Amino acid sequence: MLELKNITKRFAGKLILDGVNLTVNDGQILTIVGPSGAGKTTLLRCISGLEETDSGDFFLDGQPFNPVTNRNNDTVIGVVFQDFQLFPNLTVRQNVTLAPTMVLKQTKGEAEATAQRLLKQLNLDGKADLYPYELSGGQKQRVAIVRALAMRPKLLCYDEPTSALDPDLRKEVEEIILKLKAEGMTQIVVTHDIPFAESIADQMLRVEAKS
Amino acid sequence: MNYVSQILPSLISGTGTTLSIFFWTLIISVPLGILVGLGMITNFKPLTWLIDVYVWLMRGTPLLLQLIFVFYGLPIIGIVFQRYDAALFAFILNYTAYFAEIFRGGLQAIPVGQYESARVLRLTNWQTLRTIVIPQVVKIVLPSIGNEVINLIKDSSLVYVIGLGDLLRAGNVAMARDVTLVPMVLVAVIYLLLTAVCTVVLKRLEKHYSAWR
């Protein structure tokens, strides 16, 4: 369970997040919706440790933790970026196994077995030796999901998972997210796409733009 | 033909000096260039200021002049180099500055998202640099580095000014002694061969890096 209490964030004096409180229960999906510029992505960046908060507390399973400095314990949070940010110089397989071997110190065999299993699970059979530029948008996104999952996170975050895809691929993302939910993954999805958010959410958080 | 085989040994010995300056400059200034390039993109103002001044000096004055200063100027303040060491020192200083500028450009071309992506996967800065950033930077800078590499072969002829016997000087000596242009034609052919080899190697490298985009 992830809890945020009174999270505040300013950029150059401008208040972006004003005392955000939220709770995500294990195995549930929280969607964060709201107009552009309301701070949805900023909130996600704070949760994933890419941005320092100005005040407020994070709790994971009741224990306080700091996403920015939490670098040496178990993986807490995986992130699927809006533009995926796969590593173009590495094959799909290398993209997925890089961090598990270097950070989790898995053996090459172990990491590749996990990669193989996850790739198969997300319909990426036979793509392991391709480079990212050889993949479609939807495939890139699934590789990004596999890459995050390979680090065995407790929580998976998505930033606008439908925005870089064709409209008809929206359904596909939805299915993946629900499938991962069925396997017990806790997920946070930032999106401006309300119908999409409604169809996957256990819980919705609306953030409003501050004037 | 007889004349050619007569002067060839001295030309080949000169080529040895040319190649030795070339290789050592390259082997030392490329890694140094990466380091200085990294220094240029830090937020530590005194460091970036220092590097800016260094690059300005190295790019703002002729290499010929730098050679003269290193060999004839530095002894005045008590730093004495042998001819060869002086040449190498000047070349490394000069080429590191050019390489650093090229690598800075390459480093700045890598999207912030790549670093963030590596960060959430909890790679260390060094792992990120080594496995993700540097390979991408190398691909970007390869054509510009190639230009400098070819330039370096030819620039090495400047060492004549401090009395080192390189390829061009060997040709020059033979030309003055025998009053013929033949040695210079041979010198040109040797330079062309050297740059041809470099071109082929660079093409291979670019091909290697074209596996991904």
Image (cartoon, helix red, strand yellow):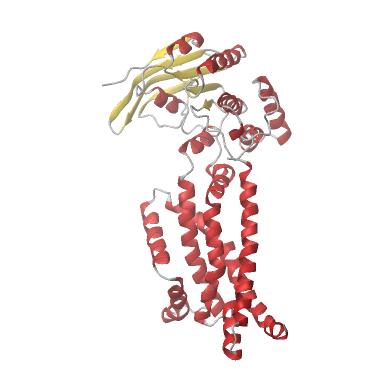
Q: Quadrant of residue B20?
A: bottom right
Query: With B9 as the anchor, is A206 left or right in this view?
Result: left
Q: Residue at x 56, y 22 (%)?
A: A154
In the displayed structure image, the side of residue B46 where residue B135 appears, left or right: right
User: A197 above or below A79?
Assistant: above
> What residue lies at 49% left-to-right and 62% top-to-bottom?
B96
Q: Return the residue found at the far left.
A: A211
Say whether residue A41 is visible.
yes
Q: Is residue B80 above or below residue A153?
A: below
x and y percentages locating residue B129 in the rendered image: 54, 45
Residue B172 image point, x, y percent: 57, 83
Q: Determine whether B81 is above or below A47 in the image.
A: below
Examine the image and state in which quarter residue B152 appears: bottom right
How many marks can you see? 0
Query: In this picture, is A115 found above or below B151?
Result: above
Image coordinates of residue B62 in percent, x first then y, are 42, 71
Q: Quadrant of the N terminus of chain B?
A: bottom right
Residue B66 lies in quadrant:
bottom left
Q: Quadrant of the C terminus of chain B?
A: top right
* Res. B38 visible in picture: no
Q: Nearer the viewer, residue A53 or A189?
A: A189
- Work out whether residue A80 or residue A68 is closer to the camera in this orientation and state it: A80
Residue A12 in the image: x percent, y percent? 29, 34
